[in-house]
């Protein structure tokens, strides 16, 4: 028991030491604040798996032999892909950043990677174009920040130490070589952070593939994160590992959930950080990668309220779209984006650049705040008045944000009562309080 306790204390000291060693640079801290200000991003799961129209996990889910799957790129030709068209549509929708899959779990690189043994979009497809290069140029032109998703696991490479997924793909089990694979990943990350301009963030996924190992798997994350921060000091690091933060991580990610919630089952036990920006990644339909049978798109009301609730919980919303194999964005996704853009043209001031407000989120809605403005977002209220447990503040002015209609405020020692004069029926009825 004593030995076990000493070992536990030793591991704790090493962890604390590692956290102490990572000191974000001024450029990194500035980038964190700018990331929080953006509030709304689009996630793009796009790869050769889109050809099969069954989502990004089709290789694993259908147990497709790794050598047979490797034939898919030979028919991948997204002839309608237009980076500027994509980025302009996102800009019109009020999107401030894009996170796109540079390499997903199937191991195929969507950029011209010289260390990928030819398994990339330029060398292995008849398309012969680097879509990430074109997207980077369009993002720079239209003022959209570009982030790269990068998978830690790989169902294609034989040197990847096989984990809990991809075990029935026919890969030999005697060629695993962690050092070789680790070098490959770092060489690719160097390419991404050297050849594509300024990158806002690297968004990792997949370390959970070895979460069930009898002996804890050492991903050597600290060294990898240090490489990223060395190559681009302002590039943020996020990791979708479903656990508390590791040293060197600049963003905390919540998959299919808002911070502090666990409705999807991925965030159980995660402590919401108060030191780094928060991000909630959500699907627009039910799928991440293009799924031809998935037409279960969330309504515009659901999506707008999802964005508002994220902002009220001091988080960004990263909303996913799965582009089609022909290079087009699904029509329904574009329609939903337009709806969100139209709403943000009116209410964007209450979202962009804000932080979670002084009043904690409730079932009725949330608050956001910027300087001396407190925005009360009412999304579910059956009454014509709303009580806010705000004490010690003086309200200089209260009005309906949309049209400036005055709102009567009754102050008591317990807080403030907003007399709205009607039961709110809008997607988001916003009251602006000047404090």
Image (cartoon, rainbow, N blue to C red):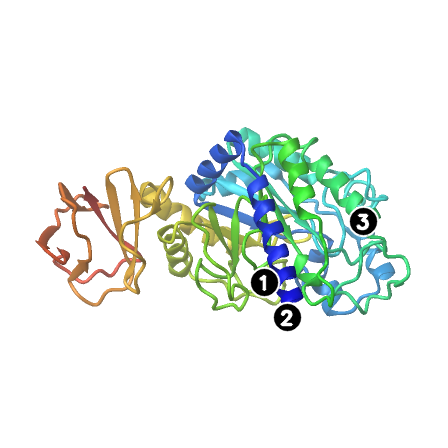
- Which marked residue is nearer to the observer: mark 2 or mark 3? 2
Query: Mark 2: few, some, or many residues within 10 Å (few <14, many ≥20)?
Result: few
**Which class describes the residues within 10 Å of circle 1: few (<14), some (14-19), or many (20+)?**
many
- The residue labelled by disc 3 is 181
Farthest residue, direction front:
2
Q: Residues within 10 Å of mark 3 (few under 14, many from 20)?
A: some
Q: Nearer the viewer, residue 38 or 272?
A: 272
Seen from the viewer's position, the closer of residues 215 and 32 is 215
- Toward which corner of the image does residue 7 lie, by quadrant? bottom right
Is residue 43 rendered to the left or right of residue 167?
left
Label 2, label 1: how far apart the Cα atoms are: 47 Å
Q: Total number of numbered labels?
A: 3
> From the viewer's perspective, is 367 left or right of 131?
left
Question: CA–CA distance between discs 3 and 1?
Answer: 29 Å
Who comes first in sequence, dot 3 or dot 1? Answer: 3
Q: State the mark number for residue 1.
A: 2
Is 268 drawn above or below residue 336 in the view shown? below
Query: Residue 30, image x and y in percent?
Result: 47, 33
Q: Residue at x 66, y 31 (%)?
A: 231
**Which residue does the image show at 81% across and 37% down from the upper left?**
114
Query: In the rendered image of this protein, does residue 416 appear above or below residue 92?
Result: below
**Between 312 and 272, the one nearer to me in the picture:** 272
Q: Is residue 419 visible?
A: no
Q: Which mark's residue is nearer the viewer, 3 or 1?
A: 3
Residue 333 against residue 125 in the figure, above or below:
below
Q: Position of residue 233 (x, y in %)?
A: 59, 32
Q: Earlier in the sequence, mark 2 or mark 3?
A: 2
Residue identifier under label 1: 287
Element assignment for label 3:
helix
Q: Secondary structure at mark 2?
A: loop
The C terminus sits in image quarter: top left
The reply to whether residue 40 is in sight is: yes
């Amino acid at each position: 028991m004593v030995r076990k306790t000493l070992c536990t204390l030793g591991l704790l000291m090493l962890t604390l030491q590692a956290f102490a060693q990572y000191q974000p640079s001024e450029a990194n801290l500035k980038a964190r604040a700018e990331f929080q200000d953006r509030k709304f991003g689009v996630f793009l799961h796009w790869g050769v798996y889109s050809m099969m129209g069954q989502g990004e996990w089709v290789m694993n889910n259908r147990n497709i032999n790794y050598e047979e799957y490797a034939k898919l790129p030979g028919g991948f030709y997204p002839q309608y892909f237009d980076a500027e068209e994509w980025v302009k549509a996102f800009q019109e929708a009020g999107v401030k950043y894009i996170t796109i899959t540079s390499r997903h779990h199937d191991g195929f690189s969507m950029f011209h990677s010289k260390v990928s043994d030819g398994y990339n979009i330029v060398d292995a497809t008849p398309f012969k174009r680097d879509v990430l290069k074109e997207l980077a140029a369009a993002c720079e032109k239209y003022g959209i920040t570009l982030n790269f998703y990068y998978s830690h696991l790989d169902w294609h490479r034989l040197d990847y130490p096989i984990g809990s997924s991809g075990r029935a793909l026919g890969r030999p089990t005697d060629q695993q070589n962690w050092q070789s694979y680790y070098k490959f990943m770092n060489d690719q990350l160097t390419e991404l952070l050297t050849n594509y301009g300024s990158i806002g963030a690297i968004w990792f996924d997949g370390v959970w593939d070895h979460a069930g190992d009898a002996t804890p798997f050492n991903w050597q994350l600290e060294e990898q994160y240090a490489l990223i921060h060395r190559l681009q000091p302002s590039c943020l690091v996020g990791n979708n590992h479903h656990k508390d933060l590791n040293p060197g991580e600049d963003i905390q990610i919540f998959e299919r959930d808002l911070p502090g919630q666990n409705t999807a089952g991925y965030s159980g036990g995660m402590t919401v950080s108060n030191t780094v920006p928060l991000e909630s990644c959500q699907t627009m339909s039910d799928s991440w990668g293009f799924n031809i049978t998935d037409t279960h798109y969330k309504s515009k009301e659901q999506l707008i309220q999802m964005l508002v609730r994220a902002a009220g919980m001091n988080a960004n919303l990263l909303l996913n779209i799965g582009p089609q194999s022909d290079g087009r964005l699904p029509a329904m996704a574009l329609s939903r984006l337009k709806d969100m853009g139209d709403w943000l043209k009116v209410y964007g001031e209450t979202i962009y650049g804000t932080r979670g407000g002084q009043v904690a989120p409730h079932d009725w809605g949330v608050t956001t705040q910027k300087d001396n403005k407190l925005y009360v977002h009412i999304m579910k209220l059956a009454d014509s008045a709303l009580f806010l447990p705000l004490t010690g503040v003086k309200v200089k002015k209260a009005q309906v944000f949309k049209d400036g209609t005055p709102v009567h405020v009754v102050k008591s020692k317990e807080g403030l009562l907003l007399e709205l004069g009607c039961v709110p029926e809008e997607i988001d009825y916003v009251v602006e309080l000047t404090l």
